[in-house]
Protein backbone atom coordinates (compact mmCIF):
# COMPACT_ATOMS: atom_id res chain seq x y z
CA UNK A 1 0.00 0.00 0.00
CA UNK A 2 1.25 3.45 -0.90
CA UNK A 3 1.20 6.19 1.72
CA UNK A 4 -1.31 8.11 -0.39
CA UNK A 5 -3.70 5.14 -0.10
CA UNK A 6 -3.85 5.50 3.69
CA UNK A 7 -6.46 7.41 5.62
CA UNK A 8 -5.50 10.74 7.13
CA UNK A 9 -5.91 9.25 10.61
CA UNK A 10 -3.50 6.41 9.83
CA UNK A 11 -1.03 8.87 8.30
CA UNK A 12 -1.27 11.08 11.38
CA UNK A 13 -0.68 8.12 13.69
CA UNK A 14 2.25 6.93 11.57
CA UNK A 15 3.92 10.34 11.60
CA UNK A 16 3.45 10.63 15.37
CA UNK A 17 4.98 7.17 15.84
CA UNK A 18 7.81 8.03 13.40
CA UNK A 19 6.89 5.04 11.23
CA UNK A 20 7.37 7.39 8.28
CA UNK A 21 8.10 11.08 7.82
CA UNK A 22 6.04 14.00 6.47
CA UNK A 23 8.50 14.28 3.57
CA UNK A 24 7.70 10.69 2.54
CA UNK A 25 3.98 11.43 2.75
CA UNK A 26 4.42 14.59 0.70
CA UNK A 27 6.54 12.87 -1.95
CA UNK A 28 3.96 10.15 -2.55
CA UNK A 29 1.04 12.57 -2.75
CA UNK A 30 2.93 14.78 -5.20
CA UNK A 31 3.67 11.70 -7.29
CA UNK A 32 -0.02 10.80 -7.24
CA UNK A 33 -0.95 14.32 -8.35
CA UNK A 34 1.51 14.10 -11.24
CA UNK A 35 0.00 10.76 -12.28
CA UNK A 36 -3.69 11.59 -11.98
CA UNK A 37 -4.39 15.31 -11.95
CA UNK A 38 -3.79 15.97 -15.68
CA UNK A 39 -6.84 13.78 -16.43
CA UNK A 40 -9.07 14.89 -13.54
CA UNK A 41 -8.10 18.54 -12.85
CA UNK A 42 -9.04 18.50 -9.19
CA UNK A 43 -6.01 20.31 -7.74
CA UNK A 44 -5.31 23.80 -9.10
CA UNK A 45 -2.74 26.49 -8.27
CA UNK A 46 -0.35 23.74 -7.13
CA UNK A 47 2.68 25.15 -5.35
CA UNK A 48 6.22 24.39 -6.49
CA UNK A 49 7.00 20.75 -5.57
CA UNK A 50 10.53 21.59 -4.43
CA UNK A 51 9.17 24.20 -2.03
CA UNK A 52 6.60 21.73 -0.72
CA UNK A 53 9.25 19.07 -0.16
CA UNK A 54 11.40 21.60 1.70
CA UNK A 55 8.45 22.48 3.95
CA UNK A 56 7.77 18.80 4.57
CA UNK A 57 11.40 18.17 5.53
CA UNK A 58 11.11 20.93 8.12
CA UNK A 59 8.05 19.10 9.50
CA UNK A 60 10.18 15.92 9.69
CA UNK A 61 12.26 17.52 12.44
CA UNK A 62 9.51 19.52 14.15
CA UNK A 63 7.46 18.30 17.13
CA UNK A 64 3.96 17.23 16.11
CA UNK A 65 1.82 20.37 16.06
CA UNK A 66 -1.60 18.77 15.69
CA UNK A 67 -3.63 16.10 13.95
CA UNK A 68 -2.73 17.42 10.47
CA UNK A 69 1.01 17.66 11.19
CA UNK A 70 2.89 17.22 7.93
CA UNK A 71 -0.17 16.22 5.90
CA UNK A 72 -0.69 17.77 2.44
CA UNK A 73 -3.91 19.74 2.12
CA UNK A 74 -5.41 21.51 -0.89
CA UNK A 75 -7.89 24.21 0.11
CA UNK A 76 -11.15 24.86 -1.71
CA UNK A 77 -10.69 27.82 -4.06
CA UNK A 78 -13.44 29.81 -2.34
CA UNK A 79 -11.32 30.30 0.79
CA UNK A 80 -8.52 32.84 1.09
CA UNK A 81 -5.02 31.37 1.43
CA UNK A 82 -2.21 33.71 2.42
CA UNK A 83 0.38 33.97 -0.32
CA UNK A 84 -1.43 31.49 -2.59
CA UNK A 85 -3.68 32.43 -5.50
CA UNK A 86 -7.38 32.38 -4.65
CA UNK A 87 -9.68 32.93 -7.65
CA UNK A 88 -13.26 31.89 -6.76
CA UNK A 89 -13.15 30.50 -10.32
CA UNK A 90 -13.59 34.04 -11.68
CA UNK A 91 -11.50 35.98 -14.16
CA UNK A 92 -12.03 38.98 -11.87
CA UNK A 93 -9.70 37.33 -9.37
CA UNK A 94 -7.55 35.28 -11.74
CA UNK A 95 -4.35 36.75 -10.28
CA UNK A 96 -5.56 37.48 -6.75
CA UNK A 97 -3.16 36.52 -3.93
CA UNK A 98 -4.64 37.14 -0.45
CA UNK A 99 -2.58 38.67 2.31
CA UNK A 100 -4.23 36.61 5.05
CA UNK A 101 -5.79 33.20 5.58
CA UNK A 102 -9.49 32.58 6.04
CA UNK A 103 -10.36 31.47 9.57
CA UNK A 104 -10.75 27.84 8.51
CA UNK A 105 -7.42 27.82 6.69
CA UNK A 106 -5.65 29.33 9.69
CA UNK A 107 -7.07 26.59 11.92
CA UNK A 108 -5.92 23.82 9.58
CA UNK A 109 -2.44 25.35 9.29
CA UNK A 110 -2.25 25.60 13.08
CA UNK A 111 -3.01 21.87 13.24
CA UNK A 112 0.06 21.23 11.09
CA UNK A 113 -1.31 21.03 7.55
CA UNK A 114 0.97 21.89 4.64
CA UNK A 115 -1.09 23.79 2.07
CA UNK A 116 -0.11 22.43 -1.35
CA UNK A 117 -2.61 24.25 -3.58
CA UNK A 118 -6.34 24.72 -4.11
CA UNK A 119 -9.22 22.50 -5.19
CA UNK A 120 -11.35 23.47 -8.16
CA UNK A 121 -14.85 24.98 -7.95
CA UNK A 122 -17.62 26.41 -10.14
CA UNK A 123 -17.34 30.16 -10.72
CA UNK A 124 -18.32 31.84 -7.42
CA UNK A 125 -19.39 28.43 -6.14
CA UNK A 126 -22.69 28.78 -8.02
CA UNK A 127 -23.99 25.46 -9.26
CA UNK A 128 -22.95 21.87 -8.64
CA UNK A 129 -20.65 21.35 -11.64
CA UNK A 130 -17.03 22.43 -11.09
CA UNK A 131 -16.03 24.33 -14.21
CA UNK A 132 -14.80 27.89 -14.56
CA UNK A 133 -12.92 30.12 -17.04
CA UNK A 134 -9.76 30.22 -14.91
CA UNK A 135 -9.03 26.55 -14.21
CA UNK A 136 -11.35 24.62 -16.52
CA UNK A 137 -13.48 21.61 -15.59
CA UNK A 138 -13.01 18.93 -12.95
CA UNK A 139 -13.84 15.45 -14.19
CA UNK A 140 -15.35 12.54 -12.32
CA UNK A 141 -12.69 9.97 -11.37
CA UNK A 142 -15.10 7.10 -12.08
CA UNK A 143 -15.96 8.36 -15.58
CA UNK A 144 -13.96 11.28 -16.92
CA UNK A 145 -16.75 12.19 -19.35
CA UNK A 146 -18.90 13.08 -16.31
CA UNK A 147 -18.98 15.84 -13.72
CA UNK A 148 -17.43 15.51 -10.27
CA UNK A 149 -20.21 17.72 -8.90
CA UNK A 150 -19.69 20.89 -6.94
CA UNK A 151 -19.05 23.27 -5.64
CA UNK A 152 -16.50 21.14 -3.76
CA UNK A 153 -15.92 19.05 -6.88
CA UNK A 154 -12.15 19.41 -6.84
CA UNK A 155 -12.05 18.35 -3.19
CA UNK A 156 -14.17 15.24 -3.78
CA UNK A 157 -12.27 14.18 -6.90
CA UNK A 158 -8.94 14.79 -5.16
CA UNK A 159 -10.01 12.53 -2.30
CA UNK A 160 -11.31 9.75 -4.53
CA UNK A 161 -8.07 9.66 -6.53
CA UNK A 162 -5.88 9.73 -3.39
CA UNK A 163 -4.27 13.04 -4.37
CA UNK A 164 -5.15 14.41 -0.92
CA UNK A 165 -5.80 12.48 2.31
CA UNK A 166 -8.54 14.80 3.57
CA UNK A 167 -10.24 17.96 2.32
CA UNK A 168 -12.26 20.98 3.34
CA UNK A 169 -15.53 21.75 1.60
CA UNK A 170 -18.37 24.21 1.94
CA UNK A 171 -22.08 23.74 1.53
CA UNK A 172 -25.00 26.02 0.84
CA UNK A 173 -27.10 23.95 -1.54
CA UNK A 174 -25.37 20.60 -1.26
CA UNK A 175 -21.96 21.88 -2.29
CA UNK A 176 -20.02 19.30 -0.31
CA UNK A 177 -22.73 16.62 -0.14
CA UNK A 178 -23.37 16.46 -3.89
CA UNK A 179 -19.73 16.00 -4.99
CA UNK A 180 -19.20 13.52 -2.16
CA UNK A 181 -22.04 11.45 -3.63
CA UNK A 182 -20.75 11.83 -7.19
CA UNK A 183 -17.20 10.79 -6.19
CA UNK A 184 -17.87 8.01 -3.64
CA UNK A 185 -16.54 9.78 -0.53
CA UNK A 186 -17.98 11.27 2.67
CA UNK A 187 -19.03 14.90 3.00
CA UNK A 188 -20.32 16.36 6.26
CA UNK A 189 -22.38 19.51 6.53
CA UNK A 190 -22.22 20.41 10.25
CA UNK A 191 -24.89 22.14 12.30
CA UNK A 192 -24.88 25.76 11.20
CA UNK A 193 -22.57 27.76 13.46
CA UNK A 194 -20.34 24.86 14.51
CA UNK A 195 -17.68 25.78 11.93
CA UNK A 196 -17.48 29.58 11.92
CA UNK A 197 -16.83 31.82 8.95
CA UNK A 198 -14.82 35.01 8.84
CA UNK A 199 -15.63 38.22 10.68
CA UNK A 200 -15.50 40.39 7.55
CA UNK A 201 -19.00 39.54 6.29
CA UNK A 202 -22.59 39.46 7.54
CA UNK A 203 -22.95 37.18 10.52
CA UNK A 204 -26.66 37.57 11.25
CA UNK A 205 -28.54 37.02 7.98
CA UNK A 206 -26.15 34.70 6.13
CA UNK A 207 -27.27 31.48 7.80
CA UNK A 208 -27.61 29.14 4.81
CA UNK A 209 -24.00 28.10 4.14
CA UNK A 210 -21.23 26.51 6.17
CA UNK A 211 -17.80 25.00 5.76
CA UNK A 212 -17.21 21.36 6.68
CA UNK A 213 -14.96 18.30 6.29
CA UNK A 214 -14.70 15.71 3.52
CA UNK A 215 -12.82 12.41 3.61
CA UNK A 216 -12.72 8.74 2.62
CA UNK A 217 -13.48 7.56 6.18
CA UNK A 218 -15.85 8.83 8.84
CA UNK A 219 -13.03 8.87 11.40
CA UNK A 220 -11.17 11.33 9.18
CA UNK A 221 -14.32 13.44 8.85
CA UNK A 222 -14.69 13.56 12.63
CA UNK A 223 -11.05 14.42 13.27
CA UNK A 224 -10.97 17.16 10.65
CA UNK A 225 -14.20 18.56 12.09
CA UNK A 226 -12.48 18.86 15.47
CA UNK A 227 -9.81 21.00 13.79
CA UNK A 228 -12.38 23.18 12.01
CA UNK A 229 -15.03 23.58 14.71
CA UNK A 230 -15.42 25.88 17.68
CA UNK A 231 -16.59 29.46 18.13
CA UNK A 232 -14.90 32.48 16.64
CA UNK A 233 -15.47 35.26 19.20
CA UNK A 234 -15.83 37.79 16.39
CA UNK A 235 -18.64 35.84 14.67
CA UNK A 236 -22.15 35.42 16.19
CA UNK A 237 -23.99 32.16 16.89
CA UNK A 238 -20.89 30.04 17.49
CA UNK A 239 -21.27 26.54 18.90
CA UNK A 240 -18.82 24.63 21.14
CA UNK A 241 -16.47 22.01 19.73
CA UNK A 242 -16.72 18.36 20.77
CA UNK A 243 -14.37 15.37 20.77
CA UNK A 244 -16.22 13.95 17.78
CA UNK A 245 -13.65 11.24 17.01
CA UNK A 246 -13.98 9.89 20.55
CA UNK A 247 -17.76 9.63 20.20
CA UNK A 248 -17.94 7.33 17.17
CA UNK A 249 -18.90 4.14 19.04
CA UNK A 250 -22.66 3.67 19.10
CA UNK A 251 -25.17 0.89 19.66
CA UNK A 252 -27.36 1.04 16.56
CA UNK A 253 -29.99 -1.33 17.94
CA UNK A 254 -33.31 0.42 18.24
CA UNK A 255 -32.20 3.60 16.50
CA UNK A 256 -35.16 4.97 14.54
CA UNK A 257 -34.63 6.33 11.04
CA UNK A 258 -37.24 8.17 8.96
CA UNK A 259 -36.86 7.47 5.24
CA UNK A 260 -38.09 10.58 3.41
CA UNK A 261 -37.28 9.28 -0.07
CA UNK A 262 -38.44 11.54 -2.87
CA UNK A 263 -40.52 13.68 -0.49
CA UNK A 264 -43.79 12.04 -1.42
CA UNK A 265 -43.07 12.26 -5.14
CA UNK A 266 -42.18 15.96 -5.07
CA UNK A 267 -38.56 15.38 -6.10
CA UNK A 268 -38.12 13.56 -9.42
CA UNK A 269 -35.33 10.98 -9.37
CA UNK A 270 -33.40 9.30 -12.13
CA UNK A 271 -33.86 5.51 -12.21
CA UNK A 272 -31.75 3.48 -9.81
CA UNK A 273 -31.04 6.13 -7.19
CA UNK A 274 -33.83 5.17 -4.80
CA UNK A 275 -32.91 1.49 -5.26
CA UNK A 276 -29.37 2.11 -4.00
CA UNK A 277 -30.74 4.06 -1.05
CA UNK A 278 -33.08 1.17 -0.25
CA UNK A 279 -30.09 -1.19 -0.24
CA UNK A 280 -28.22 1.16 2.11
CA UNK A 281 -31.22 1.26 4.44
CA UNK A 282 -31.08 -2.54 4.56
CA UNK A 283 -27.58 -2.16 6.04
CA UNK A 284 -29.00 0.00 8.82
CA UNK A 285 -31.78 -2.50 9.45
CA UNK A 286 -29.23 -5.33 9.64
CA UNK A 287 -27.51 -3.37 12.42
CA UNK A 288 -30.76 -3.25 14.38
CA UNK A 289 -32.18 0.10 13.28
CA UNK A 290 -35.88 0.64 12.74
CA UNK A 291 -36.45 2.26 9.34
CA UNK A 292 -39.87 3.74 8.64
CA UNK A 293 -41.46 6.03 6.08
CA UNK A 294 -43.63 8.65 7.83
CA UNK A 295 -47.24 8.41 6.70
CA UNK A 296 -47.94 12.15 6.93
CA UNK A 297 -46.00 14.37 4.48
CA UNK A 298 -43.31 16.27 6.36
CA UNK A 299 -43.85 19.68 4.76
CA UNK A 300 -44.97 21.02 1.35
CA UNK A 301 -41.96 20.93 -0.97
CA UNK A 302 -43.10 23.99 -2.91
CA UNK A 303 -43.15 26.09 0.25
CA UNK A 304 -39.61 24.98 1.07
CA UNK A 305 -38.52 25.94 -2.45
CA UNK A 306 -40.19 29.35 -2.15
CA UNK A 307 -38.48 30.03 1.15
CA UNK A 308 -35.11 28.77 -0.06
CA UNK A 309 -34.98 30.66 -3.34
CA UNK A 310 -36.09 33.90 -1.69
CA UNK A 311 -33.51 33.79 1.10
CA UNK A 312 -30.75 32.60 -1.23
CA UNK A 313 -31.51 35.33 -3.77
CA UNK A 314 -31.48 37.96 -1.04
CA UNK A 315 -28.03 36.86 0.12
CA UNK A 316 -26.54 36.50 -3.35
CA UNK A 317 -27.88 39.82 -4.63
CA UNK A 318 -26.43 41.75 -1.71
CA UNK A 319 -23.21 39.80 -1.47
CA UNK A 320 -22.45 40.39 -5.17
CA UNK A 321 -23.94 43.87 -5.61
CA UNK A 322 -20.64 45.80 -5.88
CA UNK A 323 -19.46 43.55 -8.71
CA UNK A 324 -22.83 43.80 -10.42
CA UNK A 325 -22.85 47.60 -10.28
CA UNK A 326 -19.48 47.85 -12.02
CA UNK A 327 -20.09 47.25 -15.77
CA UNK A 328 -16.59 45.90 -16.33
CA UNK A 329 -16.95 43.38 -13.52
CA UNK A 330 -20.55 42.51 -14.37
CA UNK A 331 -19.42 41.53 -17.87
CA UNK A 332 -17.24 38.83 -16.29
CA UNK A 333 -20.04 37.16 -14.31
CA UNK A 334 -21.54 33.95 -15.66
CA UNK A 335 -25.26 33.90 -16.59
CA UNK A 336 -26.26 31.85 -13.55
CA UNK A 337 -24.64 34.35 -11.20
CA UNK A 338 -26.32 37.26 -12.97
CA UNK A 339 -29.65 35.46 -12.66
CA UNK A 340 -29.10 34.92 -8.92
CA UNK A 341 -28.37 38.62 -8.39
CA UNK A 342 -31.30 39.83 -10.47
CA UNK A 343 -33.69 37.48 -8.66
CA UNK A 344 -32.78 39.17 -5.41
CA UNK A 345 -32.74 42.78 -6.55
CA UNK A 346 -36.51 43.13 -6.72
CA UNK A 347 -37.34 41.38 -3.46
CA UNK A 348 -39.59 43.19 -1.02
CA UNK A 349 -39.06 42.98 2.72
CA UNK A 350 -42.45 41.29 2.93
CA UNK A 351 -41.25 38.42 0.72
CA UNK A 352 -38.13 37.90 2.81
CA UNK A 353 -40.18 37.93 6.01
CA UNK A 354 -42.66 35.41 4.58
CA UNK A 355 -39.76 33.17 3.56
CA UNK A 356 -38.43 33.30 7.10
CA UNK A 357 -41.87 32.41 8.47
CA UNK A 358 -41.98 29.31 6.27
CA UNK A 359 -38.50 28.41 7.45
CA UNK A 360 -39.56 28.77 11.08
CA UNK A 361 -42.67 26.62 10.62
CA UNK A 362 -40.62 23.95 8.90
CA UNK A 363 -38.04 23.98 11.71
CA UNK A 364 -40.82 23.35 14.23
CA UNK A 365 -42.23 20.50 12.13
CA UNK A 366 -38.83 18.82 11.89
CA UNK A 367 -38.28 19.24 15.63
CA UNK A 368 -41.48 17.26 16.19
CA UNK A 369 -40.30 14.59 13.75
CA UNK A 370 -37.01 14.28 15.61
CA UNK A 371 -39.03 13.66 18.75
CA UNK A 372 -39.80 10.27 17.19
CA UNK A 373 -36.74 9.57 15.05
CA UNK A 374 -33.00 9.67 15.73
CA UNK A 375 -32.22 10.53 12.11
CA UNK A 376 -33.83 11.20 8.75
CA UNK A 377 -32.56 9.97 5.40
CA UNK A 378 -32.85 11.36 1.86
CA UNK A 379 -30.94 10.72 -1.38
CA UNK A 380 -28.04 13.14 -1.79
CA UNK A 381 -28.79 13.77 -5.46
CA UNK A 382 -31.68 13.37 -7.89
CA UNK A 383 -29.48 12.66 -10.92
CA UNK A 384 -26.40 10.60 -11.67
CA UNK A 385 -23.16 12.42 -12.53
CA UNK A 386 -23.97 14.07 -15.87
CA UNK A 387 -21.81 14.84 -18.94
CA UNK A 388 -19.14 17.48 -18.40
CA UNK A 389 -20.38 19.36 -21.48
CA UNK A 390 -23.66 20.22 -19.75
CA UNK A 391 -23.93 23.34 -17.63
CA UNK A 392 -26.71 21.69 -15.63
CA UNK A 393 -29.46 19.06 -16.12
CA UNK A 394 -32.42 20.54 -17.97
CA UNK A 395 -34.88 17.81 -16.96
CA UNK A 396 -35.23 14.77 -14.70
CA UNK A 397 -37.33 11.92 -16.06
CA UNK A 398 -39.12 14.36 -18.34
CA UNK A 399 -39.79 16.89 -15.58
CA UNK A 400 -38.28 20.22 -16.71
CA UNK A 401 -35.97 22.07 -14.33
CA UNK A 402 -37.04 25.73 -14.28
CA UNK A 403 -33.78 27.01 -12.75
CA UNK A 404 -30.12 26.08 -13.03
CA UNK A 405 -30.15 24.61 -9.52
CA UNK A 406 -33.57 22.99 -9.15
CA UNK A 407 -32.11 19.56 -9.93
CA UNK A 408 -30.45 19.79 -6.47
CA UNK A 409 -33.72 20.45 -4.62
CA UNK A 410 -33.41 17.33 -2.46
CA UNK A 411 -30.70 18.98 -0.33
CA UNK A 412 -32.87 21.95 0.68
CA UNK A 413 -34.67 20.22 3.59
CA UNK A 414 -31.28 20.02 5.30
CA UNK A 415 -29.76 23.35 4.29
CA UNK A 416 -32.77 25.53 5.02
CA UNK A 417 -32.66 24.93 8.78
CA UNK A 418 -28.97 24.11 9.26
CA UNK A 419 -29.24 20.42 10.17
CA UNK A 420 -26.10 18.29 10.48
CA UNK A 421 -25.96 15.86 7.56
CA UNK A 422 -23.46 13.28 6.33
CA UNK A 423 -23.51 12.17 2.70
CA UNK A 424 -22.91 8.41 2.77
CA UNK A 425 -21.66 6.52 -0.30
CA UNK A 426 -24.31 3.95 -1.23
CA UNK A 427 -22.69 2.18 -4.15
CA UNK A 428 -22.81 2.31 -7.92
CA UNK A 429 -25.51 2.31 -10.55
CA UNK A 430 -25.76 0.32 -13.75
CA UNK A 431 -23.37 2.73 -15.52
CA UNK A 432 -20.74 2.32 -12.81
CA UNK A 433 -21.38 5.79 -11.39
CA UNK A 434 -21.43 6.51 -7.63
CA UNK A 435 -24.32 7.83 -5.57
CA UNK A 436 -24.87 8.97 -1.99
CA UNK A 437 -27.52 9.30 0.68
CA UNK A 438 -27.98 12.05 3.28
CA UNK A 439 -28.11 10.98 6.91
CA UNK A 440 -29.28 13.94 9.01
CA UNK A 441 -30.07 14.61 12.65
CA UNK A 442 -31.51 17.48 14.68
CA UNK A 443 -29.56 20.69 15.23
CA UNK A 444 -26.60 20.00 17.50
CA UNK A 445 -26.65 16.21 16.99
CA UNK A 446 -23.45 16.20 14.91
CA UNK A 447 -21.81 13.53 17.08
CA UNK A 448 -24.84 11.24 16.70
CA UNK A 449 -24.89 11.59 12.92
CA UNK A 450 -21.16 10.88 12.67
CA UNK A 451 -21.42 7.85 14.96
CA UNK A 452 -24.27 6.39 12.90
CA UNK A 453 -22.23 7.11 9.78
CA UNK A 454 -19.22 5.35 11.28
CA UNK A 455 -21.27 2.22 11.94
CA UNK A 456 -22.43 2.30 8.32
CA UNK A 457 -18.87 2.84 7.04
CA UNK A 458 -17.54 -0.14 8.99
CA UNK A 459 -20.30 -2.28 7.47
CA UNK A 460 -19.74 -1.13 3.87
CA UNK A 461 -16.55 0.88 3.11
CA UNK A 462 -17.68 1.93 -0.36
CA UNK A 463 -14.76 4.39 -0.76
CA UNK A 464 -12.53 1.32 -0.82
CA UNK A 465 -13.77 0.79 -4.39
CA UNK A 466 -11.25 2.97 -6.14
CA UNK A 467 -11.74 4.76 -9.46
CA UNK A 468 -10.32 3.09 -12.58
CA UNK A 469 -7.41 5.44 -13.15
Image (spheres, grey):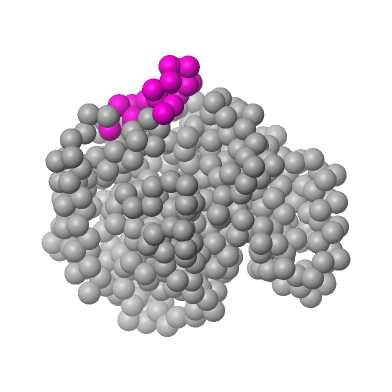
Visible in this render: residue 297?
A: yes
**Left/right of residue 382 with respect to residue 100 in the rendered view:** left
Kindly indicate the quadrant of the structure image that contains residue 227.
bottom right
Task: Tell me the quarter of the image containing the C terminus.
Answer: top right
Residue 19 left/right relative to 130: right
Q: Quadrant of residue 294?
A: bottom left
Whether residue 276 is visible to the viewer of this picture, yes or no, is: no
Q: Residue at x 85, y 44 (%)?
A: 50
Give the main secondary structure of the magenta stretch: helix
**Magenta run includes residue 419:** no
x 32%, y 81%: residue:
254
Task: Write down the region rendered in magenta.
Answer: 322-344
Horizontal and vertical percent position of residue 115: 69, 50
> In the rendered view, would you say 144 is above or below 360?
above
* Closer to us: 53 or 375: 53
Please name the residue shown 82% across and 45% down the image.
51
Amino acid sequence: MRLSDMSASDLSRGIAARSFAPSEVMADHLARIAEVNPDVNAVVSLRDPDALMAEARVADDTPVAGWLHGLPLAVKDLLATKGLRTTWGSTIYADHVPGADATLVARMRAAGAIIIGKTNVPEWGHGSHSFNPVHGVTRNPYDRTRTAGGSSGGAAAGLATRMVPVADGSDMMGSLRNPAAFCNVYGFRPTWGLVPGDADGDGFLATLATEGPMARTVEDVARLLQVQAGPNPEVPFGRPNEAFADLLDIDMRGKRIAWLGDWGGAYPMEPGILDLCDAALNVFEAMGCIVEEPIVPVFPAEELWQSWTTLRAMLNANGMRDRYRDPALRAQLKPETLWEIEQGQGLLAEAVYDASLIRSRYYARMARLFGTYDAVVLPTAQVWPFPVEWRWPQAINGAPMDTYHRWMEVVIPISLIGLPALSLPVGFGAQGLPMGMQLAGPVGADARVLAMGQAYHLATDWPGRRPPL
